[in-house]
């Protein structure tokens, strides 16, 4: 479950704002407005389950309006110093893939697709957070995605397969103070979310996405902060999603969790908040146990309680400070707590996405974990916890 | 008796190309305080040259020009100008009031040049205008006045800063005889009373007659020195 | 503070308000012309720099390419291979509005997704309605400021039309750029922002970028980036800084600006004469008053101070008025300046003047300084006034006349000095000093010339027109102290007229001759461009082939003109076909034609005379050309005469050009027809071949005519300045003559009293002023010729590098003479009228 509206609004606003100047403008947008892709003509819809094939489905699906490659991970170096990272490349169609006739389309610049990317690094020990944003068009090879060999990139930020079957990935991105150069193991079979990969987000046929995850990717590599290189290892989570439309007008935000538990289970769940403060029944998630068995979760399976408040010094937005998560079906009752309170991304449309630590019990046994939490719709007039 | 003007063996000549034109030959002359002297002579006799030398406008080629005790012939041009503004009062044939100044301002001018300003100057100038009977015309422009009135302003201007010596160059030359008479009376009255010396250059018998003494100049020589009565 | 003494002086101008007013107007006009030219130049320059700054944004560095710009692939290398995120591609061009008056519009094609670090003010506010997504997706979408939209009559969401390279181009306004401050708003004037892909389409620049803006940090990382950049850039692409680029562009107009400034200074010189004249009169008129004051004991220093203060009041008032006038005038001149810059140098869009501190300060300083210099002599004269009340004017005049020969000799020496300086010191500043010396020297010679002319004329005048004419002649001489200055001022103005007239005529003659020699083809085909005499807009593809295939054509020559950047100002590069038949179209300043052409065909280039002079290049030297293959040193085979651009021209065979540059475009074609063919018919034929393409198809005659028309247009501003200098001079002579004649009311009263009737007084006054005009005109003939010589052979050559033929045009002399006399006569009318009206008795009573 990722940032529909973030991406859509960004296409509108990207130029106007730049990375640091978004605040005054985002207030002008309501979620419904930014979601309102008025003309879906010419795009495919996620309206029925499909057959996933890999590595082809790692590549782009240009018939759909939006798509993303989402990597998050929790890393540590030999001395136990902890880090988190987020690297995302979004694809968005500027127009339907059917060619329109105009003189300017002869120009290489007038492609039908634009890309956005976010890079964020959290240094837990130093309580530092770095985040960057980029945009490009699918022009001249400035940005793009391809399945064979797998590669998705924007300028010099990129994820490439180092093997033909895309089982090994290399993630490289750097800007400002931070640089990532990570090897990701993509050999685990993907988890198809929702109904065999069709993830319904709101009522109506086609208001859904195709969604798969690779929850556990063994990760090694180099993470550099301010010239200091750390040799790190850890676990990454990859989310892939593509769609043309998804959310309903009264869905104002969501909270998304991707958790690695130390008993080998991986949990993904999301929680769509409605304008009236209630939780949308289309919320849900999935449980993958250590053996690879996958159990879909519905909103009825999940109890999620925000605990405390954190007020962003940048936007004034009020976010939950942590969460209490209970999944009775799995005997899980844990606290999900950010490793650093301020992991709000200062990008065109602001949201909070950061590394978390998980502690609690499973079937009365202590359990720990880590993962990533995304909280959207708080910074622009959405509902508060 | 204080000697105001004392000329000793004054020579004046002009070099005109190769020739030298001598206009004053060894002139000796004395005028005492309170004395009113008329200088008479034909055109070209050297009257104006002598007047210019006495006033410090021109210098003598030789001799001493002692006015009020100092030899102005030894002074620089600037010093002579200072001397003139302090110690000399002028009355001209053509009045020569400053056309851009009012009657009062014309009278104020010598005071101002001598550093007297403000109320003191104003009072003194008005007194002077009162003495020449023109206090009521103080703010009039000079060209609104008749010739006699203009000359009365000129007299006031010549005397207002209390000079040692008043020089009058044909003071009645441009006036009818009655008006001329008035001016003469004013001049002699106002100079004599205050112990100043008055030197009038004139052609006029009446003017000469009003003087205490008449000095005649002829071809650059002082030839006669008689009292007005004798003339 | 001597209040009364001051009043005696300061009230003086109030008694003669006209005289004071004319002096003020004279100073004002001199100052006005100087600052107007300055402001107009400065405004054009600032407009250019501002628009450059606006379109450059915060870039620290720029990549620029050859004539075809930069291959857009380079941008990918910078982003993906070098990883320099702060980089933005730009495609630029110009359009013309279809409004009246037309605006030159700058098209800035950008990648909106790369813009944020560079040009935040060029991005719209207002969220969804702002038009950004339309910019990326909608064909022909543009953004512009509200002011520009108003000027173009464009409304949001509505299509409108402009002209690009002569062809109509529809556009849609999808968003308005709104910024707070006025300066930024002005920077957005006449700027059309569009997506880079759209710009490529409009301007026919697919695959190419005009430049890439970069922000490279100054730290170690920046150094690494620079090193890395060097490895990915193709040879023709260069890293430069925006300021270097802007500077080399604005330097193109340096000669043009210097010349305008010099002409404007001439107006000030005439203005100086005016204030000199006025103050001299003030002294002469006031001599009795000054004499009286001296008698009363006012010192020389005090008199000098009085005069200085009075003159300064005139100077300050005149300067203040001049600044006001100058600002107004600048607005009028701006159009002319901008048009010339657009015609010859580069495109600048400027509609309103920008007031800056320096031109105004310069105006104030020059106005006051010139006035004080002009005041020096009258002040000295005034201070020297002897303490006398009855002054013989004749003695003063005698003294003046004694001075006349000395002044004449001094003048001659000064003129000689000016000539030697111009001859010997080949620097533009020295040339102007020399010209100034020549001018002042001529002014000093004027009095003795006046005396001489009058002596010659007098017997003739008496015999032909009687005693009154004779009186008039003598009066001019007897009042030389007053007449001389007025005559000198008029003389200078007329001489300037002659000099500028001869210079323009010489230029025209030379260029027309040159055009006849060099323009040989019968029909010319080119693409319309904003810069009128620059043919660097490429012809649409296929035009050459189609024209060459037309029946009835002997042969077609191809030309490719581009602006070639160098370390200093850019030069014009013309690649062309040269066959033996074309050899006669070149006139050689240096080089042997029998050797030039073989060398040219082998590996050499030929360069224009201005380039050779500017860069001290000769046959046998090499010129380093920046090509797409890197720097190439090319030997110079010959130096040809050229009057197209002072920036310099380089010519090379088109095949060699195409070898060194990735540019197969053709800028223009020269079409040669068989001997008896009708070229106008061929013009029509060619036009009909391309009904939908904007092409300039011109016959030999039309091209020559339009070239001369552009030339004439560039002299429009020169003519305006010349006219202004003449007006200043006229005001001067009017003031001088009026004052002079009015001063003699008494004398005229006497003449009336002894029986002259008003008609005869008219005659007398007008004869006098007419004679003064005649003298001024006569003296101006040789002086003007000398000044023309200086302008043509010294100043033009130094600042533009042109060898001109001297055009002797009798009508210029005749016009000048007539102008001088008519101006003088006109100036005599008011005094004559007033003097003739005065009753004799009244006149006698004056003073």
Image (tube, rainbow, N blue to C red):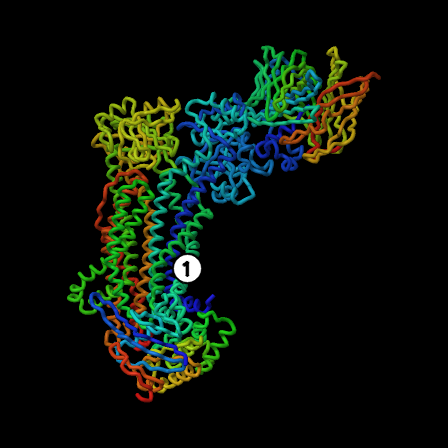
Q: Nearer the viewer, residue A4 or A176?
A: A176
* Residue C786 seen in this snapshot: yes
Q: Position of residue C123 (x, y in %)?
A: 55, 36
Q: Position of residue A182 (x, y in %)?
A: 63, 17
Q: Nearer the viewer, residue C49 or C177?
A: C49
* Residue C843 seen in this snapshot: no
Q: Nearer the viewer, residue C638 or C101?
A: C638
Dividing the picture into quadrants, the one containing residue B28 is: bottom left
Instruction: Decide if residue C415 is on the left or right side of residue C142.
Output: left
Q: Nearer the viewer, residue A239 or A127?
A: A127
Is C253 placed above or below A41 here?
A: below
Instruction: Decide if residue C83 is on the left or right side of residue C422.
Output: right
Which residue is at the far right?
Answer: A364
How packed mark 1 is, by other alpha carbons closer than 10 Å (few <14, some 14-19, many 20 or more), is some
Q: Position of residue C602 (x, y in %)?
A: 28, 22
Q: Secondary structure at mark 1?
A: helix
Q: Position of residue A104 (x, y in %)?
A: 48, 29
Q: Residue at x 21, y 50 (%)?
A: C810
Mark 1 — residue?
C312
Is C554 placed above or below B53 here?
A: above
Dividing the picture into quadrants, the one containing residue B174 is: bottom left
Is C209 placed above or below C810 here?
A: above
Q: Chain of mark 1?
A: C
Which residue is at the far bottom?
Answer: B229
**Exactly how many numbered labels are in the figure?**
1
Which image quadrant: the C terminus of chain C? Answer: bottom left
Q: Residue at x 34, y 66 (%)?
A: C385
Is C97 placed above or below A328 here?
A: below
């Amino acid at each position: 479950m990722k940032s529909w509206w973030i991406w859509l609004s960004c296409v509108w606003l990207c130029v106007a704002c730049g990375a640091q100047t978004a605040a005054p403008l985002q207030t002008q947008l309501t979620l419904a407005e930014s979601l309102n892709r008025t003309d879906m003509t010419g795009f495919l819809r996620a309206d029925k389950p499909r057959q996933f094939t890999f590595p082809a489905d790692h590549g782009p699906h240009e018939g759909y309006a939006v798509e993303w490659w989402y990597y998050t991970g929790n890393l540590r170096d030999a001395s136990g110093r902890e880090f988190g990272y987020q690297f995302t490349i979004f694809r968005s169609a500027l127009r339907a893939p059917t060619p329109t006739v105009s003189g300017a389309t002869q120009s290489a610049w007038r492609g039908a697709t634009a890309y956005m990317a976010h890079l964020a690094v959290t240094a837990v020990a130093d309580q530092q957070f770095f985040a960057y944003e980029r945009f490009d068009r699918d022009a001249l090879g400035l940005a793009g995605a391809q399945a064979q060999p797998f590669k998705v990139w924007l300028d010099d930020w990129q994820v490439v397969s180092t093997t033909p079957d895309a089982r090994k990935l290399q993630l490289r991105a750097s800007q400002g103070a931070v640089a990532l150069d990570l090897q990701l193991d993509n050999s685990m079979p993907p988890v198809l979310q929702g109904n065999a990969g069709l993830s319904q987000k709101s009522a109506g046929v086609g208001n859904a996405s195709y969604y798969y995850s690779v929850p556990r990717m063994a990760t090694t590599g180099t993470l550099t902060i301010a010239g200091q290189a750390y040799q790190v290892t850890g676990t990454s989570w990859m989310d892939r999603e593509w769609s043309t439309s998804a959310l309903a007008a009264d869905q104002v935000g969501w909270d998304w969790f991707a958790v690695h538990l130390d008993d080998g289970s991986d949990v993904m769940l999301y929680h769509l908040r409605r304008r009236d403060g209630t939780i949308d029944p289309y919320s849900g998630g999935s449980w993958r146990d250590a053996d690879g068995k996958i159990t879909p979760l519905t909103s009825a399976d999940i109890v999620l309680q925000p605990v405390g408040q954190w007020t962003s010094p940048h936007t004034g937005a009020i976010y939950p400070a942590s969460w209490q998560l209970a999944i009775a079906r799995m005997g899980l009752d844990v606290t999900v707590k950010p490793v650093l309170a301020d992991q709000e991304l200062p990008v065109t449309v602001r949201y909070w996405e950061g590394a978390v630590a998980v502690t609690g019990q499973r079937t009365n046994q202590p359990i720990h974990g880590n993962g990533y939490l995304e909280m959207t719709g708080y910074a622009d007039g959405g509902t508060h916890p | 008796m204080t000697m105001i003007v004392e000329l000793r063996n004054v020579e004046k000549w002009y070099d005109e190309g190769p020739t030298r034109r001598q206009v004053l030959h060894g002139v000796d002359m004395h005028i005492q305080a309170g004395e009113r002297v008329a200088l008479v002579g034909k055109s070209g006799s050297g009257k104006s040259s002598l007047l210019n030398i006495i006033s410090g406008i021109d210098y003598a080629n030789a001799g001493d020009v002692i006015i009020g005790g100092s030899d102005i012939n030894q002074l620089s041009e600037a010093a002579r100008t200072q001397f003139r503004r302090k110690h000399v009062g002028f009355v001209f044939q053509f009045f020569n009031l400053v056309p851009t100044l009012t009657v009062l301002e014309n009278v104020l001018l010598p005071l101002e040049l001598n550093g007297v300003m403000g109320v003191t100057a104003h009072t003194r100038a008005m007194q002077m205008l009162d003495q020449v009977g023109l206090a009521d015309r103080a703010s009039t422009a000079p060209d609104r006045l008749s010739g006699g009135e203009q000359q009365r302003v000129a007299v006031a201007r010549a005397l207002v800063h209390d000079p040692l010596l008043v020089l009058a160059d044909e003071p009645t030359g441009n006036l009818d005889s009655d008006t001329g008479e008035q001016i003469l009376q004013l001049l002699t009255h106002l100079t004599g009373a205050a112990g100043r010396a008055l030197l009038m250059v004139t052609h006029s018998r009446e003017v000469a007659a009003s003087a205490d003494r008449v000095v005649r100049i002829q071809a650059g020589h002082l030839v006669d020195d008689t009292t007005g009565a004798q003339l | 503070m001597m209040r009364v003494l001051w009043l005696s002086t300061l009230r003086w101008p109030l008694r003669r308000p006209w005289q004071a007013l004319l002096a003020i107007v004279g100073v004002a006009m001199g100052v006005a012309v100087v600052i107007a030219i300055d402001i107009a130049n400065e405004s054009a320059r600032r407009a250019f720099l501002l628009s450059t700054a606006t379109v450059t944004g915060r870039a620290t560095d720029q990549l620029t390419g050859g004539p075809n710009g930069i291959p857009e692939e380079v941008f990918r290398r910078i982003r993906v291979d070098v990883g320099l995120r702060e980089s933005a591609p730009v495609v630029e061009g110009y359009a013309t509005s279809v409004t009246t008056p037309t605006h030159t519009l700058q098209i800035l094609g950008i990648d909106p997704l790369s813009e944020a670090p560079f040009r935040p003010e060029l991005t719209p506010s207002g969220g969804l309605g702002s038009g950004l997504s339309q910019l990326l997706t909608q064909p022909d979408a543009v953004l512009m400021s509200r002011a520009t939209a108003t000027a173009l009559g464009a409304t949001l969401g509505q299509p409108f039309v402009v002209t690009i390279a002569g062809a109509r181009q529809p556009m849609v306004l999808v968003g308005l750029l709104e910024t707070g401050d006025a300066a930024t708003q002005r920077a957005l004037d006449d700027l059309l922002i569009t997506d880079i892909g759209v710009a490529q389409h409009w301007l026919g620049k697919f695959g190419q970028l005009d430049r890439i803006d970069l922000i490279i940090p100054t730290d170690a990382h920046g150094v690494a980036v620079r090193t890395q950049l060097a490895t990915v850039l193709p040879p023709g692409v260069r890293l430069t800084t925006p300021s270097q680029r802007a500077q080399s562009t604005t330097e193109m107009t340096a000669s043009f600006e210097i010349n305008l400034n010099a002409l404007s200074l001439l107006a000030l010189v005439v203005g100086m004469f005016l204030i000199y004249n006025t103050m001299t009169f003030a002294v002469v008129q006031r001599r009795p008053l000054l004499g009286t004051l001296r008698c009363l004991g006012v010192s020389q220093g005090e008199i000098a101070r009085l005069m200085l203060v009075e003159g300064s009041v005139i100077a300050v008032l005149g300067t203040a008025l001049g600044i006001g006038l100058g600002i107004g005038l600048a607005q009028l001149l701006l159009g002319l300046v901008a048009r010339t810059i657009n015609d010859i140098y580069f495109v600048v869009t400027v509609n309103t003047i920008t007031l800056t501190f320096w031109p105004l300060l310069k105006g104030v300083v020059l106005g006051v300084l010139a006035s004080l210099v002009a005041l020096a002599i009258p002040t000295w004269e005034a201070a020297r006034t002897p303490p006398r009340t009855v002054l013989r004017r004749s003695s003063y005049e005698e003294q003046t006349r004694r001075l006349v020969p000395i002044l004449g000799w001094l003048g001659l020496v000064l003129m000689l000095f000016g000539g030697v300086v111009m001859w010997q010191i080949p620097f533009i500043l020295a040339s102007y000093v020399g010209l100034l010396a020549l001018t002042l020297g001529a002014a000093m010679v004027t009095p003795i010339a006046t005396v001489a002319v009058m002596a010659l004329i007098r017997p003739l005048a008496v015999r032909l027109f009687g005693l009154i004419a004779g009186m008039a002649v003598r009066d001019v001489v007897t009042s030389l102290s007053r007449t001389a200055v007025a005559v000198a001022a008029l003389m200078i103005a007329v001489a300037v007229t002659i000099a500028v007239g001869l210079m323009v005529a010489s230029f025209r003659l030379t260029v027309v001759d040159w055009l006849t020699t060099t323009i040989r083809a019968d029909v010319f085909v080119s693409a319309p461009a904003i810069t009128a005499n620059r043919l660097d807009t490429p012809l649409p593809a296929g035009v050459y082939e189609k024209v060459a295939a037309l029946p009835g054509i002997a042969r077609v020559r191809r030309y490719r003109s581009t602006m070639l950047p160098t370390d200093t100002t850019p030069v014009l590069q013309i690649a062309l076909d040269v066959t033996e038949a074309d050899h006669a179209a070149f006139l050689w300043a240096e080089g042997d034609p029998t050797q030039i052409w073989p060398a040219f065909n082998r590996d050499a280039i030929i360069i224009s005379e201005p380039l050779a002079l500017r860069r001290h290049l000769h046959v046998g030297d090499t010129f380093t050309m920046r090509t797409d293959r890197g720097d190439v040193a090319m030997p110079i085979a010959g130096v040809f005469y050229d009057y197209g651009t002072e920036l310099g021209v380089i010519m090379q065979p088109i095949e060699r050009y195409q070898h060194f540059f990735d540019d197969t475009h053709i800028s223009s074609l020269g079409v040669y027809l068989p001997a008896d063919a009708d070229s106008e018919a061929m013009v029509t034929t060619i036009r009909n071949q391309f009904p939908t393409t904007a092409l300039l198809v011109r016959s030999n005659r039309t091209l020559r005519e339009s070239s001369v028309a552009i030339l004439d247009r560039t002299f429009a501003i020169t003519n305006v300045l010349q006219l202004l200098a003449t007006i200043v001079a006229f005001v001067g002579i009017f003031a001088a003559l009026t004052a002079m004649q009015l001063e003699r009311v008494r004398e005229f009263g006497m003449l009336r009293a002894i029986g002259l009737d008003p008609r005869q007084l008219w005659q007398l006054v007008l004869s006098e002023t007419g004679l003064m005009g005649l003298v001024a005109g006569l003296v101006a003939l040789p002086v003007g010729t000398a000044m023309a010589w200086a302008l043509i052979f010294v100043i033009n050559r130094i600042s533009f590098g042109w060898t001109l033929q001297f055009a002797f045009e009798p009508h210029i002399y005749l016009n000048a003479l007539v102008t001088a006399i008519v101006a003088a006569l006109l100036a005599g009318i008011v005094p004559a009228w007033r003097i003739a009206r005065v009753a004799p008795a009244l006149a006698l009573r004056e003073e």
